[in-house]
Image (cartoon, grey):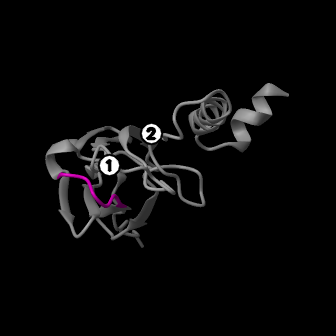
Amino acid sequence: MLSRLFYKTPDVWNDFYRMNQNLERLFGSGNRELFSFNSSGVFPAFNIYDEGDNLVISAEIPGIDVKELDISATGNSLTVKGERKAPLVDEKASFHRQERGHGVFSRTISLPLDIDADKVDAEYKLGVLKITLPKAKEARPRKIEIKA
């Protein structure tokens, strides 16, 4: 039964994070959350699409200094780590609502095929991180000649 839980949930660690987050809310952590989640329950959320010789990943990560991002790629996995700094507010100020999270985050995903990690390219513009992952030569489609 436990194995079904792991197969149903693509990123099991996010379930553990949500449980920990709920316990912190219950037992008090000053209403402070490490980072905000979107509707899919993960941060950052990735869009992954195929552009022929490349896989492309885009992620919305607003409010993060590019110096605070760390991206690493191996054969068929990608890790994005970073930190969103806490907002600077006057010491006398008190929040009525604080929905934008801050803190350290890390997300590792398995890719559907092997990539050429030496040629990965990333750009960050207007809060959107775009990572271009060239497919490994063996993973690229190739034309097969038919002998008659």
Q: Which residues are magenta?
A: 60-65
Marks 2/1: CA–CA distance: 40 Å
Instruction: Please give the label number shown on residue 34.
Output: 2
Circle 2 or circle 1, nearest the eye: 2
* Magenta highlight on residue 85: no
Upstream in sequence: badge 2 or badge 1: 2
Disc 1 marks which residue? 138
Drawn side of residue 113 relative to residue 27, left or right: left
Drawn side of residue 128 relative to residue 118, left or right: right
Q: Residue furthest front?
A: 92
Drawn side of residue 137 relative to residue 28, left or right: left
Question: In the figure, 131 relative to 26: above or below?
Answer: below
Looking at the rendered image, the quarter that the C terminus falls into is bottom left
Which sits in the foreground, 122 or 26? 26
Image quadrant in which you'd find residue 28: top right
Image quadrant in which you'd find residue 68: top left
Looking at the rendered image, the quarter that the N terminus falls into is top right
Q: Residue type at mark 2: give it.
A: Leu
Identified at 36% across, 50% down, the residue is 93
Q: Main secondary structure of the magenta part?
A: loop
Q: Residues within 10 Å of mark 1 (few under 14, many from 20)?
A: few
